[in-house]
Image (cartoon, rainbow, N blue to C red):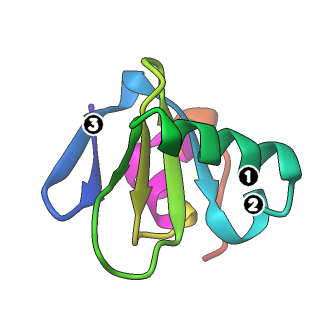
């Protein structure tokens, strides 16, 4: 299965380790440090020039920043369905 991150960027869902909301995840200094290090190492890809809402970490250490919300990406990925968790959105 594939996950569309926006602007023609697609990942295999089996490569995705996590989908994170930028507003809440970056409250942690550890997350900010991780993202800064990934940026310095050239592992960050901005999917769109629009306001970023989420970031996606892959099994090979890449980080994708997307304008699509983490909630929408999670729904697209089918992870919620696979877990059998209902949503009220």
Above or below for 42 versus 6 = above
Residue in front for this viewpoint, 43 or 82 = 43
Contact (CB < 8 A) between labels 1 and 2?
A: yes
Earlier in the chain: of badge 3 and badge 1, it is 3
Q: Which mark is residue 26?
A: 2
> Could you give the CA–CA distance between mark 1 and mark 2, rounded to whole angstroms?
5 Å
Q: Which mark is residue 11?
A: 3
Q: Residues within 10 Å of mark 3 (few under 14, many from 20)?
A: some
Q: Residue furthest top?
A: 60
Q: Is residue 89 left or right of residue 66?
A: right
Residue 65 drawn at (x, y percent): 43, 57
Q: Residues within 10 Å of mark 2 (few under 14, many from 20)?
A: some
Residue in front for this viewpoint, 69 or 23 = 23
> Could you give the CA–CA distance between mark 3 and mark 1, rounded to whole angstroms?
23 Å
Q: Which residue is mark 1?
A: 32
> Could you give the CA–CA distance between mark 2 and mark 3, rounded to whole angstroms?
23 Å
**For discs 2 and 3, the disc positioned in front in the rendered view:** 2
Above or below for 63 versus 48 = above
Residue 78 within the segment the image draws in magenta = yes
Magenta residue span:
72-80
| Quadrant that contains the N terminus | top left
Residue in front for this viewpoint, 57 or 41 = 41
Secondary element at tag 2: loop
């Amino acid at each position: 299965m594939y996950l569309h991150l926006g602007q023609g960027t697609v990942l295999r869902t089996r490569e995705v380790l996590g989908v994170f909301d930028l507003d809440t995840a970056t409250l942690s200094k550890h997350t900010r440090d991780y993202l800064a290090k990934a940026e310095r190492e050239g592992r960050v890809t901005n999917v769109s020039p629009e306001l970023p809402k989420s970031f996606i970490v892959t099994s090979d250490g890449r980080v994708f920043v997307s304008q699509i919300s983490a909630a929408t990406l999670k729904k697209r990925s089918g992870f919620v369905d696979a877990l059998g968790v209902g949503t009220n959105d």
